[in-house]
Image: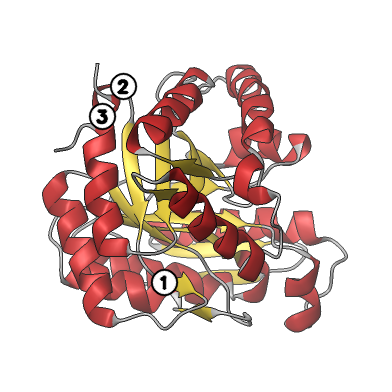
Amino acid sequence: MALKDQIKFGISLPHRSPDPIDVATIRHVAQRAEALGFSDLWVTENTLDHVNCFDPVVILTYAAAVTSKIRVGCSVVVLAVHSPLMLAHQWACMDQISGGRVILGAGLGREHHYRQFEVPVDGRVRRFREEIELIKALWTEETISYDGKFYHLNDEPMWPKPVQKPRPPIWMGVGHPDAVRRTAKLADGWMGSGGSRIADFAASVPILKEALAANGRDTTNFPISKRIFMAVDEDPAVARRELLRWFTDVYRNPPGTDTCGIHGTPEQVRARLEEMVGMGANHLMLNPVSRYAEQVEALAEIVGLK
């Protein structure tokens, strides 16, 4: 059975790279991914970065404008560095422009986000919960009243509302067991980060499923995914060299080449993806790190889309 008949596959847009990114390549990958049948296009958010990285709202709006049906998402937007009011409005507008195709991935962020943006660390989990609650309310209620510890609104409106009803899905991308359990309560999907180990993904899936069941959630159709940085080539040494450069220059974590990413010949990559399906993934986000136009074709063939 082809992999595409077992799970859904998204693909990353070219948006973060140690090399310059050509807008024509972004457009080509977006349009080819749609034509080939990938389910969604993804980016990350890295504002103060040591490599090139496009803003997620800008690039996803562009991708939505040059496509017509493929979904667009960010995994993840760090809520702590944004106003939830502004973010809710931006993503509602993007949902309108795209015709109801957005997926918002939301994250707590790491230490450097709080340092760089001068956001207090104290109470960050409580603040995150309030931000999620506010975004959901702004997307679904005609007027919003909210009285939290960090945020307060009194009968305020926000328009336009998203196209998707009751609202766009919110995914989370966290790895700590407590955060995975929080996902089961607050989110509509989960995507393990690209920098996390595949072994950690395998360990997180049963924790998530147990928490979903405890919260009365659907354990079968809840999206369970992972971003996978990857490189495919008929010469496995070439594929590994390309992925090693990514994990060295971008993540500054050379061992992640083998523990977090997937590289090799088409047959080797297919076997590794099948392993991840066996771990419980029902969606995988494939993130080529170079030769984007070539890689989207190779990955489509590997998963059975062509």
Point out which mark residue 144 bears. Answer: none
**Is the C-beta separation of discs 3 and 2 under 8 Å?**
yes
Residue 83 at x, y percent in the picture: 59, 75
Crowding near the residue tagged with mark 2, few <14, some 14–19, many ≥20 C-alpha atoms within 10 Å:
some
Q: Give the quadrant of the C terminus.
A: top left
Q: Residue at x 46, y 79 (%)?
A: 19
Label total for image: 3
Expressed as whole percent of the image width and height from the top left, the position of residue 294 reads 25, 58
What residue is shown with label 1?
A: 15
Q: Amino acid at mark 2?
A: Gln
Among the two numbered marks 2 and 1 on one chain, the one whose residue lies closer to the N terminus: 2
Please tell me the numbered disc located at residue 4.
Answer: 3
Quarter that holds the N terminus: top left
**Residue type at the position of mark 3:** Lys
Label 3 sits on a secondary structure element that is helix
**Which residue matches tag 2?**
6
Q: Is residue 152 left or right of residue 145?
A: right
Q: Secondary structure at mark 1?
A: loop
Q: Nearer the viewer, residue 218 or 173?
A: 173
* Relative horizontal placement of residue 97, taking residue 197 as reference (left or right): left
Instruction: Judge whether residue 52 can be spotted in this image.
Output: yes
Q: Amino acid at mark 1?
A: His
